[in-house]
Image: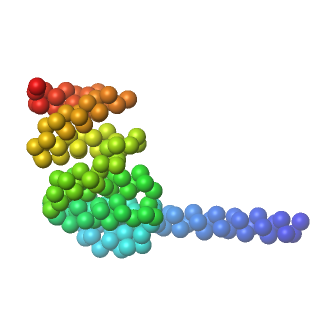
């Protein structure tokens, strides 16, 4: 009976410790996000991995993007290439790297998101929209039309996306 009490007490102690650690991490992240200086966010981001360090890395990259800093592309690429992160976050970071690319060629950007555009997943439609824009930037109207048709026949397109597709189709003309 004493052993059961000790095990239960130990488990409760561990749960309390983990809760306190999560609360401390959440509070540190909130303070860092609200701070105007990037040091606090960068310190959390330096810890690496998922959770608040990953969120801090995204926040640092977003601040760079908002400031028009060319380093945003590289900051997102670091996240996109972090094998420790879940693929959904890596793909989001890859899309953001393309949206904030300043020094990369059109071909390089298309290569980055080609796999996302070609596979079912939560980011496929956004990747296809970006592929349309990149194809047009490259001057390849036929490829833009192909991506447009792929997107148009995708299941579950939203009314907003359908409206954008109609505008793109009208702009491309015949």
Q: How many marks?
A: 0
Nearest the viewer among 78 and 131 is: 131
User: What residue appears at the point 60 percent right and 68 percent down from the top-left corner?
Assistant: 17
Q: Is residue 121 above or below residue 84?
A: above
Nearest the viewer among 29 and 124 is: 124
Q: Is residue 156 above or below residue 13?
A: above
Would you identify the image quadrant in which residue 159 lies?
top left
Measured as percent of width and height from the top left, residue 146 is found at 23, 34
User: What residue appears at the point 34 percent right and 43 percent down from the top-left corner?
Assistant: 118
Measured as percent of width and height from the top left, residue 80 is found at 35, 60
User: What residue appears at the point 67 percent right and 68 percent down from the top-left corner?
Assistant: 13
Residue 96, visible in the rendered structure? no
Residue 41, visible in the rendered structure? yes
Most extreme residue toward the right, as rendered?
A: 1
Would you identify the image quadrant in which residue 100 lies?
bottom left
User: What residue appears at the point 23 percent right and 44 percent down from the top-left corner?
Assistant: 130
> Is 31 on the left-hand or right-hand side of 103?
right
Measured as percent of width and height from the top left, residue 30 is found at 38, 62
> Is 30 on the left-hand or right-hand side of 99?
right
Measured as percent of width and height from the top left, residue 65 is found at 21, 59
Quadrant where the image shows the N terminus: bottom right
Quadrant where the image shows the C terminus: top left
């Amino acid at each position: 009976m004493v052993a059961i009490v000790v095990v239960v007490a130990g488990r409760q102690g561990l749960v309390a410790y983990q809760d306190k650690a999560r609360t401390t991490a959440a509070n540190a992240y909130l303070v860092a996000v609200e701070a105007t200086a990037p040091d606090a966010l960068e310190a959390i981001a330096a810890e690496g991995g998922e959770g608040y360090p990953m969120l801090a890395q995204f926040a640092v990259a977003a601040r760079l993007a908002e400031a028009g800093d060319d380093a945003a592309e590289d900051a997102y690429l670091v996240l996109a290439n972090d094998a420790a992160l879940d693929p959904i976050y890596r793909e989001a970071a890859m899309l953001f790297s393309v949206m904030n690319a300043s020094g990369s060629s059109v071909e390089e950007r298309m290569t980055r998101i080609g796999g996302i555009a070609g596979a079912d997943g939560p980011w496929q439609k956004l990747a296809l929209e970006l592929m349309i824009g990149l194809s047009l930037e490259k001057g390849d109207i036929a490829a833009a039309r192909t991506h447009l048709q792929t997107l148009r026949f995708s299941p579950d397109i939203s009314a907003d996306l359908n409206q954008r597709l109609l505008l793109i189709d009208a702009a491309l003309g015949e």
